[in-house]
Amino acid sequence: QVQLVESGGGLVQAGGSLRLSCTASGTIFSINDMGWYRQTPGKQRQLVASSVSVVASVKGRFTVSRDNAKKMVYLQMNSLKPEDTAVYYCYADLRTTPLRDVVRFWGQGTQVTVSS
C-alpha cells in the first residue's frame, strides 16, 4: 500500500509565502515523478508543478524541488495571491514492484487560503 501525505498548507496574507511538503511511503519500488496539482470548487484539478518544472502561471513565484532519497517533493510558494487559493494535491507516478506498471497515487490534499 502506498500513502502520500502532504503538509504545510494554511492561511496566509497576499504577498506571503508557504512551503508545502509531500512524503511518499509504503511499498514503492521506484518513483518516476512527483509533483503538485491544485483544485478550486467546481473546477478541474490543474497541474501546478512536476518534479522538474512549474507551470507558466506560477513561474517566478513557485519553486518545486524533490528529495529522491526521502521520497519527498516540496512546493515553495512565494508572493502568494488570492487566486492561488485552492486545495493542493501531491501526486506520485510510481511502481510498487519491478513488474507492475507505473500508477499515479494522490495525497489527501492540503488547503491553501490566501487573503487579500
Image: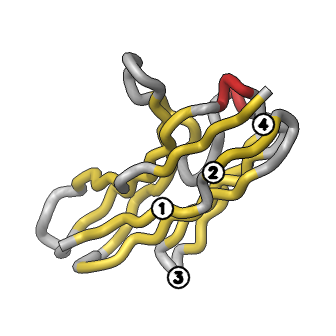
Q: Classify 10 Å Cα crowding around label 2: few (below 14), some (14-19), many (20 and above).
A: some
**The residue under label 4 is which amino acid type?**
Leu
**The residue under label 1 is which amino acid type?**
Glu
In this view, the mark in front (1 or 3): 1
Report which residue position mark 4 lands on. 80
Report which residue position mark 1 lands on. 6
Foreground pick, 77 / 92: 77
Secondary structure under tag 3 reads: loop
Q: Quadrant of residue 79?
A: top right
Say left or right for 9 vs 23.
right
Quarter of the figure that contains the C terminus: top right
Residue at 38%, 57% in the rendered image = 92
Measure the alpha-carbon separation of dots 3 and 4. Answer: 29 Å
Measure the alpha-carbon separation of dots 4 and 1. Answer: 19 Å
Disc 1 + disc 3, Cβ < 8 Å: no
Say left or right for 36 vs 75.
left
Residue at 49%, 39% in the rendered image = 87
Task: Decide which of tag 4 and tag 2 comes sooner along the chain.
Answer: 2
Task: Decide which of tag 3 and tag 4 comes sooner along the chain.
Answer: 3
Task: Decide which of tag 1 and tag 3 comes sooner along the chain.
Answer: 1
Measure the alpha-carbon separation of dots 4 and 2. Answer: 12 Å
